[in-house]
Image (cartoon, helix red, strand yellow):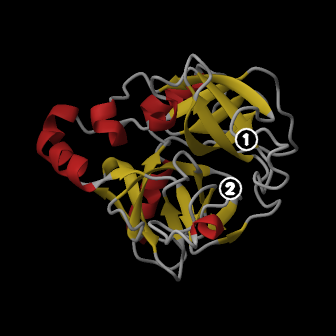
Amino acid sequence: MRTKIFALIAVVVLMLIMVAPTAAITDGELDGNGHPYVGLMVAQDASGNPLWRCSGTLLSPTLFLTAGHCTESPAAHVEIWFAADVDAGRPGNGYPFTGEVGGTPSTHPQYNPNAFFLYDLGVVVLDAPKSMSTYGVLPALNQLDALKTQRGKQDVTFTAVGYGLQQSFPTAAAWKNVAQRVRMVAHPKLIQINVPGFVGDFSVLLSNNASTGGTCFGDSGGPNFIGSSNVIGGVTSFGKNGNCAGTGGVYRVDRTDDLTWLATFGVTPP
């Protein structure tokens, strides 16, 4: 049962101070063609002005999964790229105005920007189908609960994929080298799940260090696959500090409200 918002008032106040939306892979490696169904999105307002960039996953030829804070107002339209290196060939690739495909954003009906981490889920309905041989897959209902008994084991690993900063707060001279728009992958470990208070039953904490890699600014909405599968345990949601170190927060998509909402777009767990 999803933790009640009114029971989390004190925790929400604390989290608003400590967490912020995140967005990219740190201490990872180039993904290449490992996850071609993971893309880079740029949200635009009603006038076509770019607002922010995030990552996400194709669940079907017409549905792209991302975070709620990536699709919230004033986002009115989204452009998406699936190239492993979006920067390659610039300015010919049209970034940040014209992607490989565009679409309309939609946000979880219970999403609240003042407590974004509670229902941090969004989708983009594509204007035209984007056909691929493989897509990301939704988890079964409450699938991640089984990991609670495995907390701390070395085999509880996720695969985080996304675009964006490879470091936070780089020097001016290094900026061009750590903010490349390339798809990267890391393999963070499970730190916390189903812990009352900070992560509750709506998110998990994963490691973020030089050994396992993690997420940072530029990868919000990107998938955190369970193990080495294409099953999306959750989407990158928040970080606990501005240096993108220690742990990263992932919003779970295996809860009833999430799967029920996504089913209205025609996608369900296998």
Q: Which of 122 and 143 is in front in this view?
A: 122
Q: Which of 58 and 99 is in front in this view?
A: 99
Q: Is residue 37 above or below residue 45?
A: below
Q: Do the residues labelled 2 and 1 touch (CB within 8 Å)?
A: yes
Few, some or many residues within 10 Å of mark 1 (<14, 14–19, 20+): some
Quadrant where the N terminus sits is: top left
Percent position (x, y) of residue 247? Answer: 39, 67
Percent position (x, y) of residue 35? Answer: 76, 55
Q: Which of 10 and 146 is in front in this view?
A: 10
**Residue type, mark 2 in image:** Arg
Quadrant where the C terminus sits is: top right
Q: Quadrant of residue 249?
A: bottom left
- Residue most extreme to the left: 10
Q: Which of marks 2 and 1 is in front?
A: 1
Whichever of labels 2 and 1 marks the residue nearer the N terminus, that label is: 1
Q: Which of 145 and 237 is in front in this view?
A: 237
Residue sitting at x 65%, y 39%: 41
Is residue 86 something one can see in this rendering? yes
Percent position (x, y) of residue 204? Answer: 40, 56
Percent position (x, y) of residue 137? Answer: 67, 44
Cα separation between marks 2 and 1: 10 Å
Few, some or many residues within 10 Å of mark 2 (<14, 14–19, 20+): many
Residue picked out by circle 1 = 95
Residue picked out by circle 2 = 181
Q: In this view, does 126 lie above or below 30?
A: above
